Image (spheres, rainbow, N blue to C red):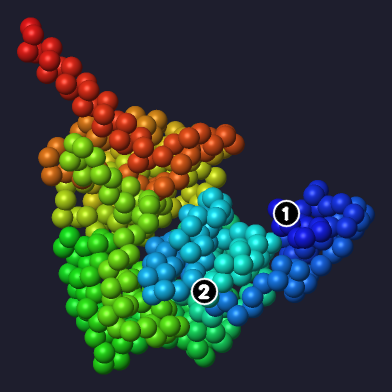
Amino acid sequence: MKVNLDNSYITDNSNECEKGCYFLLTNSNSKYENDAKSKGALVINEAKARELLKINENIKIIGITGTNGKTTTAAAIYSILLDLGKKVFLCGTRGAFCNDKKVAAKSLTTGFLLELLSYLQIATLNNCEYFVMEVSSHAIAQNRCGDMKFAAKIYTNLTQDHLDFHETFENYANCKASFFQDECLKIINQDAYKFSYNVKGAITYGIENPALYSVKAYTLIDGIEAVFAVKNELYEISSSLKGLFNIYNLLAAFACVNELVKPNKDDLTNAIANYAGVMGRMQSIPNKYNKEIIVDFAHTPDGIANVLEAMKHKELIVVLGAGGNRDKSKRTPMAKIASHYAKTLFLTSDNPRDEEPITILKDMIDGLSENELKNINIVIDRRLAIYKALLAQNKNECVMILGKGDEDYQEIKGVKYPFLDEKIALECLDEIHNYEEKIRLKGEYV
């Protein structure tokens, strides 16, 4: 990418180099250094790039990592800080936002170093005090964050994911652990998978195990009502978010803001109550037919278990697929968990990428028992699967469409076709209603 300066620009791509430009040397592009030099570029390091971009080094950077919960926790911190009157930048899976305005579309969960520096430049120009970012395991392994000095780091949880990249769960865990070896404020989930971290600067949060930030009581009826505790001080928390997993997300955000800002108690609890969640994460889809539909990004065994457990008081019709060219070992567990919770399960295509959808679906049902297969319907076309799920929906049943969240495309053989689960669901509802209306009218005039 290119980042423009007054009389030149910085790039991390040697193909963009020309005489007089700057080439930012990183772990990822070092093999192209000579190519950049041959084109007349001046090779610079991160420190020089920060100087050229005039980045404010006093911005407090908050990094959130973990298998699940990064997006919701990051967005919660961003929302709470804004409500507290702070100027904030947010970047992650959903794109980049500065003081409540979107400044970049969705891309990687964590961009490469020059992209992150360009965001810090925007944050600087907009007088941001805080910079909240999701940090993926790929970014940690590839050192995309460079020499960023974090004011706080949050560990949400660790379950199976990305083994196509890390090969083993142990490698995945070690990668995450490497992020928590410095002495900055580290906010660690006591109830999650445990790895070794630097205890200096570390504090804990949790529900099941003793922690500095704990939960004394909670209910999950029509949202969240909870009592958070910090030492002997109690905070009454109300939220429209659903599910136990979202108590963890809110508790992590609460701990981070409380430690860094030390706000007024009522201001903090009100700011938490105002946070309504993010698109594609336990997102209820309003519709004129009063059908209960929820879209969620859950695409790991643990994530699927969390969202379905949160809605287990309902009769569930579930639509689920698995991504192509990704960790194959999680496919069967995903289907097994969904089958356990669903009254009816439609297994379908997600982002098949370079794989054949039928091959992915065969992997998903491989090893399932006859009993687990009883409620499963295989419908390769995702739109048709959503249509059939909504057609099968009765009163008081909930359709949950999982795996893609607010992604607005479906990737097939290198092409990204427009596809947003929310939009497709609403279109299908209209088609079902129009068909039923035609049948009704036909019956009246026979």
Classify 152 as above or below 5: below
Q: Position of residue 239 (x, y in %)?
A: 25, 66
Residue furthest toward the top?
A: 446
Classify 195 as above or below 294: below
Q: Secondary structure at mark 1?
A: strand
- Within 10 Å of the Cα at label 2, are there few (<14), some (14-19), or many (20+) other Cα atoms? many
Q: Which mark is residue 307?
A: none
The front one of 421 and 314 is 421
Q: Is residue 177 visible?
A: no
Q: Position of residue 165 (x, y in %)?
A: 58, 57
Q: Position of residue 203 (x, y in %)?
A: 42, 86
Q: Amino acid at mark 1?
A: Lys
Point 71% across, 67% down: residue = 53
Point 34% across, 60% down: residue = 277
Q: Amino acid at mark 2?
A: Tyr
Point 37% across, 40% down: residue = 421
Q: Which mark is residue 2?
A: 1
Q: Secondary structure at mark 2?
A: strand
Q: Position of residue 426 (x, y in %)?
A: 30, 35
Q: Which mark is residue 130?
A: 2
Point 37% across, 32% down: residue = 383
On screen, residue 120 versus residue 235, left or right, reads right
The front one of 353 and 262 is 262
Residue 253 figure quarter: bottom left
Q: How many marks?
A: 2
Q: Earlier in the sequence, mark 2 or mark 1?
A: 1
The front one of 335 and 76 is 76
Split into 4 quadrants, where in the image is the C terminus? top left
On screen, residue 222 versus residue 339, left or right, reads left
